[in-house]
Image (cartoon, rainbow, N blue to C red):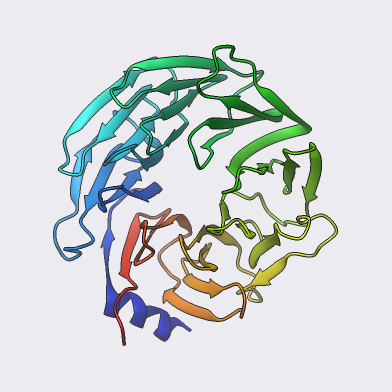
């Protein structure tokens, strides 16, 4: 498999040694690629010129803790310096907010409507496209993850003993509380807005069907799940945390009572990251040994992308059209692959 994996990265992509843990990555809405690193820098690459320089931008005094695509273009990052920062595609930096010198901005999210969100401890701060603070939403304990729904009308935050779902434009800020005992971290809202799913400290997932509050328990993981990714139409939920890509069915009544599909397993190496293709029922997956591959859910077909050997995959993502895939590792290795090429 290694030879095939090397071939795809070598023939259709480029790689870099960035020198620090890749905390997160995203393709901006302008098409550029941004990677947030543990040394406080944001690296910016142009997929249309992959062999060109990957700009290094000093965004934070300390580590980048979270990165996402900003609302319109560029990237939004939170750092352990208490700052919420926007890095433009040209590498210029703008401080959106200073949320406390001794505080960590642990999670960030943005929606194309212009909304931005950043969490510090128990508080979730919402900002508009100009950086003006809209409101602060307070939770019973530290926020473990945040997500906007597809339309940008609701924002969800996970925390101890469940999650809170807020209507962004509501005059009365009272959340719908989704209760389940335990510590909840990564969170996702299904593309059609009907389900909320969290990853728990107990090596399990928990979900809520919003129409009737039905609980969904998804267990059996040997490790914690850090990545949750729905397919484009919400039919499947792909997850990390096992020695295979675990994919749960969210159709025909949902995952309760159904076994998940397992893809690309068998060698005992944990899957550390997943990212569903933005159009097709294909999952990109990264593993603890550095292997990156593509798995087709329907057929189970596997296409190796990058060989093991560069550290555990810590960041993974597609561009909006699904023509480019990027990944980063805990050792600072990063790759960018152009999958639009034929042959």
- Residue 98 to residue 283: above or below: above
Q: Is residue 121 left or right of residue 260?
A: left
Residue at image position (33%, 74%) is: 9
Residue at image position (29%, 78%) is: 341
Q: Is residue 322 left or right of residue 248?
A: left
Q: Is residue 89 left or right of residue 303?
A: left
| Viewer-proximal residue among 51 and 249 | 249
Residue at image position (25%, 52%) is: 32
| Residue 99 visible in the displayed image | no
| Residue 152 visible in the displayed image | yes
Percent across and percent down for residue 335 are 33, 64
Q: How many marks?
A: 0
Q: Is residue 213 left or right of residue 20?
A: right
Percent across and percent down for residue 212 are 80, 37
User: What is the residue that sits farthest to the right in this orientation?
Assistant: 257
The C terminus lies in which quarter of the figure? bottom left
- Residue 141 to residue 48: above or below: above
- Residue 308 to residue 127: above or below: below
- Residue 3 to residue 170: above or below: below
Residue at image position (70%, 69%) is: 261
Percent across and percent down for residue 45 are 22, 54
Percent across and percent down for residue 37 are 34, 44
């Amino acid at each position: 498999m290694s030879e095939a994996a090397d071939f795809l990265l070598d023939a259709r992509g480029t790689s870099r040694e960035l020198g620090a843990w890749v905390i997160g990555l995203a393709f901006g809405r302008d098409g550029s690629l941004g990677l947030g690193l543990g040394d406080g820098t944001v690296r910016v690459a142009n997929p249309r010129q992959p062999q060109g320089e990957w700009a290094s931008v000093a965004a934070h005094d300390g580590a980048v803790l979270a990165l996402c695509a900003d609302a319109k273009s560029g990237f939004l990052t939170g750092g352990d310096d208490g700052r919420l920062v926007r890095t433009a595609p040209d590498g210029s930096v703008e401080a959106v907010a200073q949320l406390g010198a001794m505080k960590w901005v642990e999670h960030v999210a943005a929606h194309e409507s212009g909304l931005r969100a950043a969490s510090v401890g128990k508080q979730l701060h919402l900002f508009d496209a100009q950086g003006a603070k809209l409101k602060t939403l307070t939770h019973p304990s530290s926020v473990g993850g945040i997500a906007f729904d597809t339309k940008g009308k609701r924002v969800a935050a996970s925390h101890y003993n469940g999650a809170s779902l807020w209507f962004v434009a509501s005059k009365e800020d009272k959340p719908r509380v989704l209760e389940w005992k335990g510590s909840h971290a990564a969170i996702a809202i299904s593309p059609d807005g009907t389900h909320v799913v969290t990853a728990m400290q107990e090596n399990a997932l928990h979900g809520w069907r919003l129409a009737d509050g039905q609980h969904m328990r998804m267990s059996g993981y040997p490790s914690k799940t850090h990545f949750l990714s729905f397919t484009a139409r919400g039919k499947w939920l792909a997850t990390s945390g096992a020695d295979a890509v675990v994919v749960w069915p969210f159709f025909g009544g949902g995952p309760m009572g159904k076994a998940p599909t397992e893809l690309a397993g068998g060698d005992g190496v944990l899957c550390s990251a997943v990212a569903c293709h933005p159009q097709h029922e294909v999952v990109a997956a990264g593993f603890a040994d550095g292997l990156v591959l593509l798995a087709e859910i329907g057929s189970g077909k596997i296409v190796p992308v990058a060989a093991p050997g560069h550290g555990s995959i810590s960041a993974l993502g597609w561009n909006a059209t699904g023509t480019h895939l990027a990944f980063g590792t805990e050792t600072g290795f990063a790759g960018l692959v152009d999958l639009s090429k034929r042959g």
